[in-house]
């Protein structure tokens, strides 16, 4: 009995952590730029693919195993560095100030493009990069067996969330970003370089998306179509948590994560359905989500 | 030909429909099939532009597309109803009815929230459909052959007959829609798109306008879904998937909300690009679609319907 | 025609936003046919008052009666249907449409039964629209897109739209604001002329005291959420408090 509860909690925590890392970039970009970036899933996939490509190269160079984590970070960074100027400056910037929904359509178009870019660069084959997952060994808790890497995801999620929250609320740059979230026009009038803030925020969002992909790569077979689940699941997290809210993303991820874990062990048939059920529930009772994200109150 | 006649909606529609029916005799069968599918998708697109005229974009018309398709399919397999015209009509009514029930839940929301809510609806339905094995689960099921007034057409003519039926029914629907767009309530809907607050202060309800538009869009989407299912001979949960909804939005953006025929033209373009790129460039279909979408948003922001409108306005001002 | 009909009755209205007192014990009675101007410096509570009368805001306490019916908790749409229309300081019009179409929308929203099949641009509607256009001297702009029209014309249209449904009370929110000094009087003349056709009850918010004197008989002065004077124009404008807190004349 205790075992079962522990399993559910740990499984839920691991899955929630994954969800959170995946959704964090999405909700942050919405909060700052007011863009619901459907291509977020595409950037995630690129992160996974780039890790699956760079890590084998790393291993062939014969460096110490622990540094593979660095490689994964670098691959995520590389994706963000490449994609941000193209997406934000090249395309999205033309649409600032226009209808929110229109910009979402543009990100959808970019998502479609990225899907085929994956196919064109890496083909239809699946890539595997299991090695990093074996890095941290395993943990045995009674009859339970958990891979260390999976549990470390929890740490990564907490680290990312906390870091972003601290930077936003406790640093000067972060407060400038908050000002831009509240009122871009006035911030601009006060001397803030809005375009730079947007670029930086988009970069952070893209990096987080790619990071999620990078660190997920050792857990899955990296192939065409991995972005789809991300688009749907990150979307579910932000619906429940509220667009633009980091605490919301935490709660949303936890709700879905725990519900999913409970289902897997107790009611397997409902496993896929439970996410949609949570979403539907939230939509009926509180469509804007649990938190509103940082918004200025206008009388 | 007297100009007044040329401007008349009914005349234009009858002309267009007749043209298509006649042309259908001479074009190859695969093209007849493609145009029929385009009509199905176009119907859903019409629903979206009806909503767009009220200021909203739905990212989840897959919801009604799926309901329409499954309605036609289940009536066929469970109730033995195979008359195509009847199925299209019943799907239209039933899905419109579902739309009427759901509309009040969604009609209070605007912009991105409305878009997301509609998307979420379609995803919830998808989640349900893939789990119900009784109706085929994620594989869906096959539809029985259609009949027309009790007659089962021979395989060589089956596609063409369906083509004609869809042109006729869609023509009627389009004429009715155009009348709605030109009417006072239609104009008020456009006003809601521009300045909802002022409409309220003038004494009309934006909520009611949205509910009406959503119901119409639901009916149209359902009819489109039924048509698509009958044309394919198969229905599956993919009908409600978010990528299908994305294609409908693509059609609407490309067409714009100014002209009804433009929507079907946009749908046809989508189908043709899909067919050709599927055959010759299989890994670039989505890339082409994506690029196409961005280009139309940048360069033809009012849609290709704006070209139609300019063309016809020239006639009116002569 | 009886002049003693209490068209609008406001009793004990209070409204605060946090620490800001926007309305404090507001009482007034407006009778049919009156021309009333509301004056007061920015933040005095005129707009809040207007927003409460038109249903956009709900007072914390107090009641508002229109023709003896309590309208306090109703929303703008219903209040408009009951007979109070308003214009806006920044014209709220439908930008991509023409003047004609804007008025058509106003006409359509005032009607109870619509045909979904009759063309909006029909002959029946045309007559009334033409009449409104000439009343407001908007004929020449009839088929031009309103986003291209000059500021004064847009204001006229905004007011004309409010008038289409023949309301009992018309609230004008700073009708001459944003209009150049030379154009203020011609604009106000046009408005006054257009409004005089029916014996309309008009309440308008205005900052320009000359306009106030020339176009209203009664003046209500606001200061820090309270009414500090209410009466005939000359009397109010000479009132000490009004001069100190509103008009600034020594």
Image: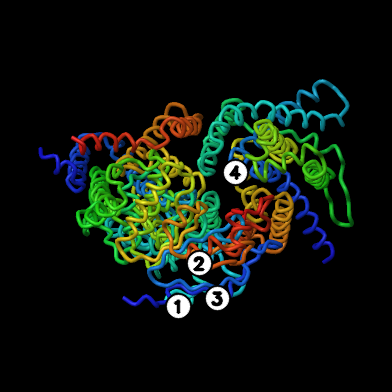
Quarter of the rendering occupied by the C terminus of chain C: bottom right
Looking at the rendered structure, whether the residues under marks 1 and 4 are on a common chain is answered as no
CA–CA distance between discs 2 and 3? 11 Å
Q: Is residue B39 left or right of residue C88?
A: left
CA–CA distance between discs 1 and 3? 13 Å
Q: Quadrant of residue C200?
A: bottom left
Q: Quadrant of residue C33?
A: bottom left
- Front residue of B283/B193: it is B193
Q: Which residue is mark 4?
A: A36
Residue found at the very far left of the displayed protein = B1
Looking at the rendered structure, whether the residues under marks 2 and 4 are on a common chain is answered as no
Looking at the rendered structure, whether the residues under marks 1 and 2 are on a common chain is answered as yes
In the picture, the disc for residue C69 is 1
Q: Which residue is mark 3?
A: C11
Q: Is residue C219 left or right of residue B276?
A: right
Q: Is residue C175 left or right of residue A142?
A: left
Nearer the observer: mark 1 or 3; the answer is: 3
Nearer the observer: mark 1 or 4; the answer is: 1
- Secondary structure at numbered mark 3: strand
Residue drawn at (59%, 58%), measured in percent from left and top?
C243
Looking at the rendered structure, whether the residues under marks 1 and 3 are on a common chain is answered as yes
- Secondary structure at numbered mark 1: strand
Q: Which residue is mark 2?
A: C53
CA–CA distance between discs 3 and 4? 48 Å
- Front residue of A103/A113: it is A103
Asked whether the beta carbons under mark 1 and mark 3 sit within 8 Å of each other, the answer is no
- Secondary structure at numbered mark 2: helix
Colour treatment of the image = rainbow
- Front residue of B55/B146: it is B55
Horizontal and vertical percent position of residue B87: 31, 58
């Amino acid at each position: 009995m205790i075992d079962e509860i522990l399993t559910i909690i740990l499984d839920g925590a691991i899955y929630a952590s994954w969800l959170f890392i995946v959704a964090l970039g999405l909700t942050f970009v919405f909060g700052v730029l007011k863009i619901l970036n459907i291509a977020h899933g595409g950037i995630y996939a690129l992160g996974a693919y780039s890790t699956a490509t760079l890590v084998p190269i790393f291993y062939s160079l014969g460096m110490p195993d622990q540094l593979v984590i660095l490689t994964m970070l670098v691959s995520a960074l590389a994706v963000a560095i490449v994609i941000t100027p193209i997406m934000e400056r090249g395309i999205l910037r033309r649409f600032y100030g226009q209808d929110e929904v229109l910009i979402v359509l543009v990100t959808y178009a970019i998502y479609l493009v990225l899907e085929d870019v994956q196919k064109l660069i890496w083909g239809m084959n699946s890539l595997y990069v299991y090695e990093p997952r074996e890095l941290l060994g395993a943990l045995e808790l009674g009859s339970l067996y958990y891979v260390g890497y999976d549990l470390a995801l929890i740490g990564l999620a907490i680290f990312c969330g906390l870091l972003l929250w601290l930077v936003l609320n406790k640093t000067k740059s972060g407060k400038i970003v908050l000002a831009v979230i509240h009122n871009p026009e006035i911030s601009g009038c006060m001397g803030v370089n809005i375009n730079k803030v947007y670029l930086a925020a988009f970069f952070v969002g893209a990096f987080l998306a790619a990071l999620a992909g990078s660190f997920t790569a050792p857990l899955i077979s990296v192939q065409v179509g991995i972005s789809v689940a991300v688009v749907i699941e990150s979307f579910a997290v932000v619906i429940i948590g509220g667009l633009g809210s980091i605490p919301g993303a935490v709660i949303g991820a936890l709700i879905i994560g725990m519900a999913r874990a409970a289902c897997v062990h107790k009611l397997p048939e409902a496993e896929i359905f439970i996410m949609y059920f949570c979403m539907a529930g939230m939509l009926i009772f509180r469509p804007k989500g649990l938190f509103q994200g940082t918004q200025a109150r206008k009388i | 030909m007297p100009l007044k006649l040329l401007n008349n909606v009914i005349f234009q529609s009858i002309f267009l429909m007749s043209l298509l029916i006649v042309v259908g005799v001479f074009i190859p069968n695969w093209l007849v099939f493609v145009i029929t599918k385009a009509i199905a998708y176009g119907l859903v697109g019409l629903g979206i532009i009806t909503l767009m005229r009220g200021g909203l974009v739905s990212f989840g018309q897959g919801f009604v597309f799926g309901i329409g398709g499954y309605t036609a399919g289940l009536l066929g397999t469970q109730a033995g109803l195979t008359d195509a015209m009847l199925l299209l009509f019943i799907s239209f009514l039933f899905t419109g009815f579902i739309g009427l029930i759901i509309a009040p839940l969604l009609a209070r929301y605007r912009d991105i929230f409305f878009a997301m809510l509609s998307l979420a609806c379609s995803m919830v339905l998808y989640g349900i459909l893939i789990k119900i094995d009784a109706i085929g689960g994620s594989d869906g099921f096959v539809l029985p052959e259609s009949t027309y007034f009790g007659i089962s057409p021979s395989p060589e003519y089956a596609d063409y007959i369906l083509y004609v039926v869809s042109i006729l029914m869609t023509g009627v629907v389009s004429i009715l829609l155009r009348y709605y767009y030109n009417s006072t309530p239609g104009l008020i809907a456009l006003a809601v798109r521009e300045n909802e607050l002022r409409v309220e202060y003038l004494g009309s309800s934006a909520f009611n306008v949205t509910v009406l538009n959503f119901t119409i869009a639901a009916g149209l989407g359902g009819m489109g879904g039924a048509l698509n299912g009958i044309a394919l001979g198969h229905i599956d949960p993919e009908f409600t998937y978010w990528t299908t909804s994305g294609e409908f939005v693509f059609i609407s953006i490309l067409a714009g909300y100014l002209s009804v025929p433009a929507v079907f033209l946009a749908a046809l373009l989508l189908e043709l690009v899909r067919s050709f790129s599927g055959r010759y460039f299989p890994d670039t279909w989505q890339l082409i679609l994506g690029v196409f979408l961005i280009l139309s948003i940048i360069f033809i922001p009012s849609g290709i319907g704006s070209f139609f409108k300019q063309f016809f306005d020239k006639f009116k001002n002569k | 025609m009886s002049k003693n009909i209490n068209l609008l009755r406001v009793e004990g209205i209070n409204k605060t936003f946090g620490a800001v007192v926007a309305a404090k014990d507001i009482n007034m009675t407006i009778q049919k046919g009156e021309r009333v101007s509301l004056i007061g410096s920015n933040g005095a509570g005129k707009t809040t008052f207007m927003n409460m009368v038109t249903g956009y805001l709900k007072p914390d306490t107090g009641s508002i009666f229109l023709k003896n019916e309590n309208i306090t908790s109703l929303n703008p749409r219903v209040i408009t249907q009951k007979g109070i229309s308003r214009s806006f300081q920044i014209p709220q019009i439908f930008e991509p449409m023409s003047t004609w179409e804007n008025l058509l929308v106003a006409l359509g929203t005032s009607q109870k039964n619509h045909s979904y099949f009759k063309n909006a641009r029909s002959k029946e509607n045309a007559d009334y629209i033409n009449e409104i256009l000439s009343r407001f001297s908007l004929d020449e702009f009839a088929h031009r897109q309103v986003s291209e029209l000059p500021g004064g014309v847009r204001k006229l249209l905004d007011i004309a739209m409010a008038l289409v449904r023949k309301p009992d009370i018309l609230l004008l929110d700073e009708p001459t604001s944003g209009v150049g000094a030379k154009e203020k009087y011609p604009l106000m003349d046009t408005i006054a002329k257009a409004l005089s056709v029916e014996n309309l009850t008009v309440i308008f918010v205005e900052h320009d005291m000359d306009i106030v004197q020339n176009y209203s008989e009664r003046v209500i002065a606001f200061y820090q959420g309270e009414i500090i004077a209410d009466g005939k124009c000359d009397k109010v404008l000479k009132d000490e408090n009004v001069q100190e807190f509103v008009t600034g004349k020594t």
